[in-house]
Amino acid sequence: MKRLLSLALASLFTASAHAGEGVSGKPIATHAVLVHGIFEDGSKFKKMKARLESHGIRCIAPKLIHHDGIGGLDFLAEHLKKDIDQAFGKDEKIILIGFSMGGIVSRHYLQQLGGAERCATFITISSPHHGTAAAWTFPSEGAVQMRAGSDFLAELARTEDRLGNIPIVSYRTPMDLIILPAESSVWDRAENVSFNIPVHPMMIQSRKVIADIERRILKPHQDTRS
């Protein structure tokens, strides 16, 4: 019995370790920016970062200041822009991936700070595009901006045409207990993709999500939206 269990666990580990192998193609951009969520520092992107770098994509996962949203999401977006420009210059095309709060910070960067001009594709993962009830549990300005009906989210909705023709994907899980309701991650401007991942933070570590992202960025730009 122990041997069978060991073999099963080994098989599961191997499948996870090799998820995405066999995916090939030329990346739509050779630079990627991974933007973390609230109370995080980017370390949860380790698996995704490794997979993207295996395809020759240089990645950065800037540590947002302040990670709890004090100062507001617009403040975080301004610092994100500085980090991107410092790492990749002001013109290099980027793949932009934002998790949870990071997706909303990234939207402000794209729509209000001119980032859309250099973005090859934009991916959000479990981001509260229409707000989340969980934001009522914390008083920071950034949390207030992520509450449903906030002026900040209304302005993003009003100016989303500034995204132009950027291919956009929004990943979500219907079992999300941080994005409440979970449907708040559904964004009409994006191609919406749902995976049954049980825990919010696991979305950026899920081999299914990572493999789907690989599939989308390793093909010609014009084919990234269906």
Image (cartoon, rainbow, N blue to C red):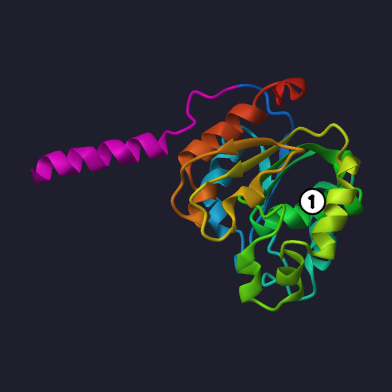
Side of 5 where 26 appears, left or right: right
**Where does the image place residue 39, in percent across and percent down from the top left?**
61, 69
Q: Is residue 12 magenta?
A: yes
Helix, strand, or loop for circle 1? Answer: helix
Q: Which residue is mark 1?
A: 107
Residue 11 lies in quadrant: top left
Name the residue located 69 percent from the left edge and 79 percent from the top edge.
Answer: 139
Depicted 5 relative to depicted 133: above or below: above
Depicted 86 relative to depicted 115: above or below: below
The stretch in magenta equals: 1-24
Quadrant the C terminus occupies: top right
Whether residue 93 is visible, yes or no, is no
Q: Residues within 10 Å of mark 1 (few under 14, many from 20)?
A: many
Name the residue located 70 percent from the left edge and 59 percent from the top edge.
Answer: 131
Side of 139 where 75 appears, left or right: right
Q: Is residue 93 magenta?
A: no
SS assignment for the magenta stretch, majority:
helix
Name the residue located 22 percent from the left edge and 38 percent from the top edge.
Answer: 8
> How many labels, in total?
1
Q: Residue furthest bottom?
A: 139
Side of 172 where 110 appears, left or right: right
**Where does the image place residue 215, in percent across and percent down from the top left?**
59, 27
Quadrant the N terminus occupies: top left
Name the residue located 64 percent from the left edge and 37 percent from the top edge.
Answer: 192
| 55 and 71: which is toward the camera | 71
**Where does the image place residue 156, in percent across and percent down from the top left?**
84, 53
Depicted 64 relative to depicted 50: above or below: below
* Tag 1: amino acid: Arg
Whether residue 162 is visible, yes or no, is yes
